[in-house]
Image (cartoon, grey):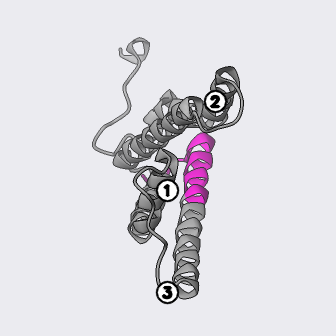
Amino acid sequence: MLGVKRPDVVTALGWIYIVLAALMLLAAIGGFVVRTVIDQRMPEGRPPVPDDAPLELRFDSIVFGHYRILCVAQTLFAVLLGLSAAQFLRLRAWARHGLEAATWLGLTCVVGVGILTASDSELPGSLLVRVVMGTVFALVYAVPCLVLIWLLRGATTRHAMLTEREPPPIPPESVS
């Protein structure tokens, strides 16, 4: 879209997502490095987890066993997020939908972790403490996700994403 100035909110959102993608990519690379060091230090592998172990320990063991696959998935997600953010800065309409879908996925994960934290019977303290911890965790991470979704769905952002084939709507009072 030549000659059209990109709104500041689009620029800010695009760069926020590029930074998030870069941080996700660094975290995935860090995960690969840590897993490689652990494998070198423990060539015999991690000891098996007993069947009667707490659920959290068994879950951690499953995650640890598939950590490289999770790092690959995070790497792919980070690359796709970064590419979508770059295309968003180029005012591609599809990129807005991709960023919104990624944000909804993040919001779902945050709420899920908040619920798991609230229902984790292994955490010290009463049920009230666990519920407050889970709620605070979910809110601290959910509010930024909701703000991003609100901004992505805002009129300024939607209007900026109109392609050359889709002219902006003409207000009724300017039609003669």
Residue 6 lies left or right of residue 133; in this view the side is left
Q: Secondary structure at mark 2?
A: helix
Residue 129 higher or lower than 33, as above or below: above
Q: Position of residue 118 (x, y in %)?
A: 58, 29
Mark nearer the N terminus (1 vs 2):
1
Q: Is residue 59 visible?
A: yes
Residue under the image location 33 percent in, 36 percent down: 167
Residue 37 lies left or right of residue 171; in this view the side is right
Disc sitting over residue 43 in the figure: 3
The magenta segment is: 1-20
Q: Secondary structure at mark 3?
A: loop
The three-letter code of the residue at mark 1 reads: Asp
Identify the residue under disc 2: 139
The three-letter code of the residue at mark 3 reads: Pro
Q: CA distance from mark 1 to mark 3?
A: 19 Å
Residue under the image location 48 percent in, 43 percent down: 106
Q: Residue 76: within the magenta?
A: no
Residue 56 lies left or right of residue 12; in this view the side is left
Q: Is residue 75 visible?
A: no
Residue under the image location 34 percent in, 47 percent down: 94
